[in-house]
Amino acid sequence: MSADKKKKRKPNIKRIVIAVLLLLAVIAGGLIISFFVFRARGKKELQGTNYREIRIEEIVPEEDIEDDGSINYKGEKYVFNPEVMTFLFMGIDHRGDLVDADEVTDYLKGGQADALILMVVNHKTKKVNLINVNRNAMAEMDVYNKDGELIDTEVKQICLAHGYGTGHEDSCERQVEAVSELFNFLQINGYYSLELNGVAELNDYVGGVEVEVLENIPKGSDELKNGKGKTITLMGEDAMRYVQYRDVKSFNSVESRMARQKQYISALFAKILDKTKEDATFPVKLLDVLEEYTVTNLNASKISYLATTCVNYEFDTENIYTLSGETVEGEEGFEEFYVDEDSLKDLIFELFYEKLE
């Protein structure tokens, strides 16, 4: 072999490594840019829904409303806060399988809303508050017949609004309208309904939820049946039973269930926020996992914006409110919860208005 023959060039490992790292950096950068574009789109879409103020003139005297729109209330001056967004989360007790909307023949079986949580996101104070709405709260709603025809407007238990419809978007929209009316036509920016059958999957996907058992749940596991006062991690069907069970033979058993729901939702919400801090795409993954159990008008971009914003906001158990009022037995033997109008008015000013100094 000739001595002056060119030697075969060896691959430069250093250059290859650098090239691969640059390629990965470009891909990662592209993904990050795509995520922020995706998130920005969600923000824009949600801001486009924030267009209506509460009909405050219906709950305060005309003389307390100034020409500039400010309101005098209990010796203080308030203005509506346009930087508040609200979202209604519904836990639906639907008996039987949820069929496609176009296959529904009975429009009275959309399922009752056993859990109603109104999430209030204040972008000015950077706080997230939750309002646990009593399922038996009496509210005005449209009433439909079996064929889906509007027949009247009546005051009924608020949980029934979802039952009028297919169990899909129409039911959710009717539930949103009833809750909005209860809060004096509050603008609700989005909704998310979850069949109670999906609670176990939600619970397990976040790794279980730790609670101190508030009362023994007879239909649960042995750990739940005799767990009062103990701290356990709810898994599987126990999570669903914990938030769903109530003793129907006991008057106003909804109150004890709401206490369990409040406790569970607080712990669950905190865990979802922690997971989102670790992985910004976690809420979208969760949305996909629960798809068969849910109906929502919150798409992936809206969820991404909402979740990644809320992780930086203040939230704790003190931020969860329950409406004050009185439960009575109605003429037909069912429980009826009448919201205390004065305390509701206080809550509206606290969460949806800002005090002027």
Image (spheres, rainbow, N blue to C red):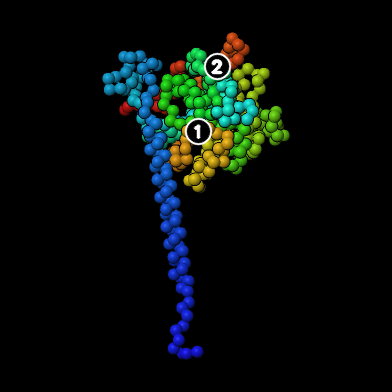
Q: Residue at x 44, y 66 (%)?
A: 18
Which residue is depicted at the point 38% across and 16% down?
Answer: 58
Whichever of callouts 2 and 1 sits on the residue coming sooner in the sequence is: 2
Q: Is 115 placed above or below 303 here? A: above
Other-residue count near label 1 (Cα within 10 Å), few / some / many at <14 / 14–19 / ≥20: some
Looking at the figure, which quarter contains the C terminus?
Answer: top left
User: Mark 1 sits on what residue?
Assistant: 296
User: Residue 167: which quarter of the image?
Assistant: top right
Q: Position of residue 296 (x, y in %)?
A: 50, 33
* Label 1: which secondary element: strand
Look at the numbered disc 2 and give the secondary structure of its residue. Answer: loop
Residue 354 occupies quadrant: top left
Marks 2 & 1, CB-CB < 8 Å contact: no
Task: Tell me what residue is drawn at x 44 percent, y 28 percent.
Answer: 188
The answer to whether residue 17 is above or below residue 27 is below
Residue 132: tell me if it is visible.
no
Seen in the image, is 251 located left or right of residue 18?
right
